[in-house]
Image (spheres, rainbow, N blue to C red):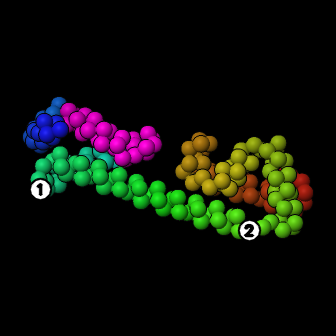
Amino acid sequence: MSGMTSRINDLYEEALRGNKPAKEELFEFLYASFRVFVRQKIVDADDREDVVQAAMAKIAAKIGSVQIAVSFAAWAHSVLKGEALEHYRRKSLTQRKLEEVSSEQDALSWPEEDSTLIGRIKDCLAKMNKVNRRYARILNLHYQGYTTQEVCRKLGVTRDNLYVVLSRARSMLRSCMDEGDITR
């Protein structure tokens, strides 16, 4: 491992001198080294790749402008460790939120009135789907908690267009709930 650390530090010095092939090789070495490191720490392959990519981006942004105290390799691995810790914090926070939502949903009991309302909403969404599938899909994705950016990406629309369509879809749903039928 110390041979690889020495090679990374040598490549870093060459990259600072403006040697572009050395900089490319440096990032290849770091990427390979990081992947080995996170494989031992993080189970999910997608999560591992996200952590490695985040660390690589941070290093690329700071290379040449950061003061290295010990060695570049040590600093780079400390950046990776920081990203891995941040990953665990985010994952832990997300897990806690999911557990809170789940326990809140378990605590809720749906009165007869609410189950009737849910049935009416489902009927209106089915009617809306027949008239304008895009409106129904946007409402469904929004209700499921997708972010605006994710919905835009899934449907291939701009943010402004999404807001217009979402407004129209809500109006159509409201109309159906009030009148029992879809009006265009």
Q: Which residues are magenta?
A: 24-51
* Most distant residue in the front direction: 40
Q: Point out which mark residue 89 bears.
A: none
- Residue 19 rendering spot, x and y as whole percentages: 12, 35
Examine the rendering and report whether any part of residue 177 can be seen.
no
Residue 108 got which mark? 2
- Image spot of residue 11 (x, y percent): 13, 37
Name which residue type carries label 1: Ala
Q: Secondary structure at mark 1?
A: loop
Who's the residue at 87% across and 67% down the image? Answer: 113
The earlier-in-sequence mark between 1 and 2 is 1
What amino acid is found at the position of numbered circle 2 in the picture?
Leu
Mark 2, Cα crowd under 10 Å, few <14 / some 14-19 / many 20+, is few
Kindly state the secondary structure of the residue where label 2 is placed.
loop
The x, y position of residue 144, in whole percent, is 66, 53
Which residue is at the far top?
A: 21
Residue tagged by mark 1? Answer: 69
Left or right of residue 34, residue 125 in this image? right
* Residue 43 drawn at (x, y percent): 43, 43
Residue 86 part of the magenta segment: no
User: What is the C-alpha distance between the residues marked 1 and 2?
Assistant: 55 Å
Camera-nearest residue between 111 and 141: 111
152 or 89: which is nearer to us?
Answer: 89
Q: Nearer the viewer, residue 67 or 164?
A: 67
Residue 137 visible: yes
